[in-house]
């Protein structure tokens, strides 16, 4: 059942008014209406609500702020303008990761051992005074902010146009270093490349090919799309993935079993692991260079998108001239075994 047209918008309005008036009781009531109503709200109401909640996000107290960010993400997934919503979500997430770094440092200074869970397991009341209210709340809020940011980063326009990704990535990396928790989804989403030049060299034949990658979350996805672009065109020998596996790596839901077509090797001779991401591939002469070797052993995986809401593309541009290919291949080390 749809949450009656206008009722969700009314709840947003009540929350706006309460937050701006710093009326904690009214804000709590309106917040409850928002969280209870978002799943049943009409798309039209959610499209309007996203930017309104984003404009308010910085004024929301630390406790509910991360949940409001998740609500904004839900609005974007249902049609709200991600460009209007992402800057506030990134800013609040950056603040949260900054405060969480303080939390990790103070926790370690207190000799408390392993960090507590994000839902409060291992925390004590005294920690709020000893460490600080905002750092504690920020640590607890990180999974919600990760979810909200990924919802924004599913948009190619956000990845291309919204500022602040580098700063947020640095804040995430700092907390990952201090905590040992990688926040992989957010780290990978922040590192997604768009319209990124990539050259693939077939070591066996010396042939090279120029491509452009966009919206590819990990190297499992890249491997499948690369095999389709090259083997599927008859440019390189090997076993091409199925049309279904390729579609799942581009824009279709679900996953389909596939088998690896190559060993992927960087110009430094190190393997390009499928578990990694395209942004990790070493750059040579301004392009990420992948050397293709025959698969040294058979491996399979469920082919699909690392980020189910993100469209992945690997566009074939052209074959390199023999001279271009030879010059690049001469700079590629033999694989490190």
Image: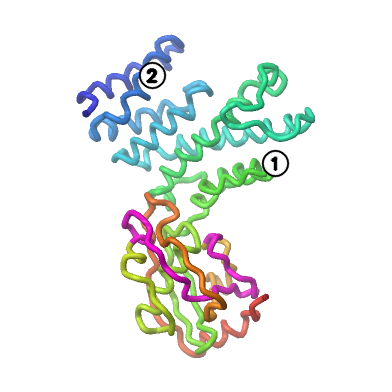
Residue 192 appears left or right of 29: right
Residue 77 in view (yes/no): yes
Label 1 with label 2: CB-CB less than 8 Å: no
Task: Tell me if residue 157 is in the magenta stretch.
Answer: no
Q: Which mark is residue 71?
A: none
What residue is at 57 percent from the left and 33 percent from the top?
A: 95
What scheme was used to colour the molecule?
A: rainbow
Q: Nearer the viewer, residue 272 or 82?
A: 272
Task: Tell me if residue 253 is in the magenta stretch.
Answer: yes
Circle 2: is it few (<14), some (14-19), or many (20+) Cα within 10 Å?
few
| Quadrant location of the C terminus in the rendered image | bottom right
The residue that disc 2 covers is 32
What residue is at 42 percent from the left and 40 percent from the top?
A: 86
Element type where label 1 sits in the image:
helix
Q: Earlier in the sequence, mark 1 or mark 2?
A: 2
Q: Nearer the viewer, residue 230 or 54?
A: 230
C-alpha gap between disc 1 and disc 2 = 34 Å
Circle 1: is it few (<14), some (14-19), or many (20+) Cα within 10 Å?
some
The residue that disc 1 covers is 178
Q: Nearer the viewer, residue 187 or 323?
A: 187
- Residue 134 point in image, percent of width and height: 61, 24
Q: Quadrant of residue 235?
A: bottom left
| Quadrant location of the N terminus in the rendered image | top left
Residue 135 in view (yes/no): no
**Magenta portion: prevailing SS class:** loop
The vertical placement of 187 against 239, above or below, is: above
Element type where label 2 sits in the image:
helix
What is the span of residues highlighted in magenta in the rendered image?
248-277
The vertical placement of 23 against 251, above or below, is: above
The vertical placement of 326 against 289, above or below, is: below
Count of numbered marks: 2
Q: Nearer the viewer, residue 170 or 74?
A: 74
């Amino acid at each position: 059942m749809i949450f009656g047209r206008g009722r969700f918008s009314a709840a947003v309005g009540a929350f706006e008014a309460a937050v701006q008036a710093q009326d904690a009781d009214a804000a709590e009531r309106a917040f409850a209406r928002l969280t209870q109503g978002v799943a049943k709200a009409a798309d039209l109401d959610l499209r309007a609500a996203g930017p309104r909640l984003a404009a308010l996000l910085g004024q929301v107290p630390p406790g509910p702020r991360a949940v409001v960010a998740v609500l904004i993400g839900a609005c974007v997934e249902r049609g709200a303008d991600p460009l209007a919503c992402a800057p506030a979500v990134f800013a609040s997430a950056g603040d949260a990761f900054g405060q969480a770094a303080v939390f990790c440092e103070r926790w370690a200074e207190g000799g408390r051992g392993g960090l507590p869970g994000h839902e409060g397991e291992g925390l004590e009341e005294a920690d709020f005074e000893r460490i600080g209210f905002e750092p504690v709340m920020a640590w607890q809020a990180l999974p919600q902010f990760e979810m909200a940011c990924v919802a924004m980063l599913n948009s190619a326009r956000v990845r291309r146009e919204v500022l602040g990704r580098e700063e947020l990535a640095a804040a995430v990396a700092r907390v990952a270093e201090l905590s040992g928790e990688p926040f992989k989804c957010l780290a990978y989403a922040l590192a997604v490349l768009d319209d990124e030049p990539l050259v693939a060299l077939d070591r066996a034949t010396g042939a090279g090919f120029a491509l452009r990658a966009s919206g590819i979350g990990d190297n499992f996805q890249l491997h499948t799309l690369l095999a389709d672009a090259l083997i599927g065109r008859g440019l390189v020998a090997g076993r091409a993935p199925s049309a279904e596996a390729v579609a799942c790596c581009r824009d279709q839901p679900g996953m389909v079993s596939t088998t690896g077509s190559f060993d992927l090797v960087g110009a430094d001779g190190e393997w390009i692991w499928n578990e990694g991401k395209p942004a990790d591939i070493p750059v040579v002469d301004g392009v990420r260079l992948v050397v293709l070797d025959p698969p040294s052993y058979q491996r399979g995986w469920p082919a699909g998108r690392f980020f189910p809401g993100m469209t992945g593309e690997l566009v074939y541009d052209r074959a390199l001239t023999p001279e271009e290919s030879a010059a690049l291949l001469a700079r590629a080390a033999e694989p490190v075994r």
